[in-house]
Amino acid sequence: MLKRYLPSCTLYPANLALLQRVFDQVCCERAYAAQSLDAEIAATTLLHLFQHGMTNEAALLAEMRRWQQEFIRRAS
Protein backbone atom coordinates (compact mmCIF):
# COMPACT_ATOMS: atom_id res chain seq x y z
CA MET A 1 0.00 0.00 0.00
CA LEU A 2 2.69 2.48 0.97
CA LYS A 3 4.56 2.08 -2.32
CA ARG A 4 1.59 3.57 -4.16
CA TYR A 5 2.20 6.94 -2.49
CA LEU A 6 5.95 7.20 -2.86
CA PRO A 7 7.19 10.56 -4.02
CA SER A 8 9.20 10.95 -7.18
CA CYS A 9 12.35 11.57 -5.15
CA THR A 10 14.70 8.72 -4.35
CA LEU A 11 14.15 6.67 -1.23
CA TYR A 12 16.69 4.11 -0.19
CA PRO A 13 15.60 0.60 0.82
CA ALA A 14 16.28 1.40 4.48
CA ASN A 15 14.02 4.48 4.24
CA LEU A 16 11.26 2.48 2.63
CA ALA A 17 11.57 -0.25 5.26
CA LEU A 18 11.35 2.35 8.04
CA LEU A 19 8.26 3.94 6.50
CA GLN A 20 6.65 0.54 6.00
CA ARG A 21 7.24 -0.42 9.65
CA VAL A 22 5.66 2.80 10.91
CA PHE A 23 2.78 2.51 8.46
CA ASP A 24 2.14 -1.10 9.47
CA GLN A 25 2.23 -0.19 13.17
CA VAL A 26 -0.19 2.71 12.69
CA CYS A 27 -2.59 0.56 10.67
CA CYS A 28 -2.39 -2.24 13.22
CA GLU A 29 -3.04 0.07 16.19
CA ARG A 30 -6.03 1.68 14.52
CA ALA A 31 -7.26 -1.47 12.76
CA TYR A 32 -7.06 0.21 9.34
CA ALA A 33 -7.51 -2.08 6.38
CA ALA A 34 -4.52 -1.72 4.06
CA GLN A 35 -6.65 -0.40 1.18
CA SER A 36 -8.88 1.89 3.26
CA LEU A 37 -9.18 5.65 3.06
CA ASP A 38 -7.81 5.88 6.61
CA ALA A 39 -4.71 3.94 5.58
CA GLU A 40 -4.31 6.19 2.53
CA ILE A 41 -4.45 9.30 4.70
CA ALA A 42 -1.96 7.76 7.13
CA ALA A 43 0.42 6.90 4.26
CA THR A 44 0.34 10.39 2.77
CA THR A 45 0.78 12.00 6.19
CA LEU A 46 3.70 9.72 6.98
CA LEU A 47 5.42 10.51 3.69
CA HIS A 48 4.86 14.23 4.22
CA LEU A 49 6.51 14.06 7.64
CA PHE A 50 9.44 12.07 6.24
CA GLN A 51 9.95 14.43 3.31
CA HIS A 52 10.02 17.37 5.71
CA GLY A 53 12.86 15.97 7.78
CA MET A 54 11.29 13.64 10.34
CA THR A 55 13.36 10.53 9.66
CA ASN A 56 13.58 8.92 13.10
CA GLU A 57 11.31 5.89 13.44
CA ALA A 58 10.27 6.56 17.03
CA ALA A 59 9.61 10.24 16.28
CA LEU A 60 7.53 9.35 13.21
CA LEU A 61 5.45 6.87 15.16
CA ALA A 62 4.92 9.33 18.01
CA GLU A 63 3.91 12.09 15.60
CA MET A 64 1.52 9.79 13.74
CA ARG A 65 -0.11 8.82 17.05
CA ARG A 66 -0.37 12.49 18.06
CA TRP A 67 -1.78 13.40 14.65
CA GLN A 68 -4.38 10.63 14.85
CA GLN A 69 -5.46 11.68 18.34
CA GLU A 70 -5.84 15.27 17.18
CA PHE A 71 -7.81 14.16 14.14
CA ILE A 72 -10.16 12.06 16.30
CA ARG A 73 -10.58 14.91 18.78
CA ARG A 74 -11.51 17.35 16.03
CA ALA A 75 -13.94 14.89 14.43
CA SER A 76 -15.82 14.42 17.70
Image (spheres, rainbow, N blue to C red):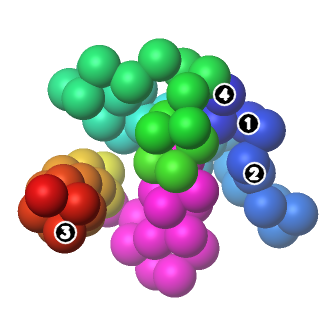
Tag 4 or tag 3, which sits nearer the N-term?
4
Q: Which amino acid does label 4 sit on?
A: Met
Instruction: Give the number of the mark in front: 2 or 4.
Output: 4
Which residue, given by chain and number where applicable, does mark 2 sit on?
Answer: 6
Task: In the rendered structure, find residue 3 and report the number of the disc placed on it.
Answer: 1
Q: How crowded is mark 2: few (under 14 residues within 10 Å), some or many (20 or more)?
A: some
Q: What residue type is labelled 2?
A: Leu
Tag 2 or tag 3, which sits nearer the N-term?
2
Rounded to the nearest angstrom, the CA distance separating label 3 from label 2 is: 28 Å
Quadrant where the C terminus sits is: bottom left
Residue 69: horizontal and vertical position, in percent?
A: 13, 57
Which residue, given by chain and number where applicable, does mark 3 sit on?
Answer: 74
Q: Give the range drawn in magenta.
A: 43-56
Residue 24: horizontal and vertical position, in percent?
A: 40, 26
Q: In the rendered structure, are the residues bearing label 2 and label 1 in contact, judged by CB atoms less than 8 Å apart?
A: yes
Q: Residues within 10 Å of mark 1 (few under 14, many from 20)?
A: few
Q: In the rendered structure, are the residues bearing label 3 and label 4 in contact, judged by CB atoms less than 8 Å apart?
A: no
> Would residue 5 be seen by someone viewing this image from the given angle?
yes
Rounded to the nearest angstrom, the CA distance separating label 3 from label 4 is: 26 Å
Would you say 8 lies left or right of 45 here? Answer: right
Would you say 5 lies left or right of 32 here? Answer: right
Q: Does the magenta stretch include residue 62?
A: no
Quadrant where the N terminus sits is: top right
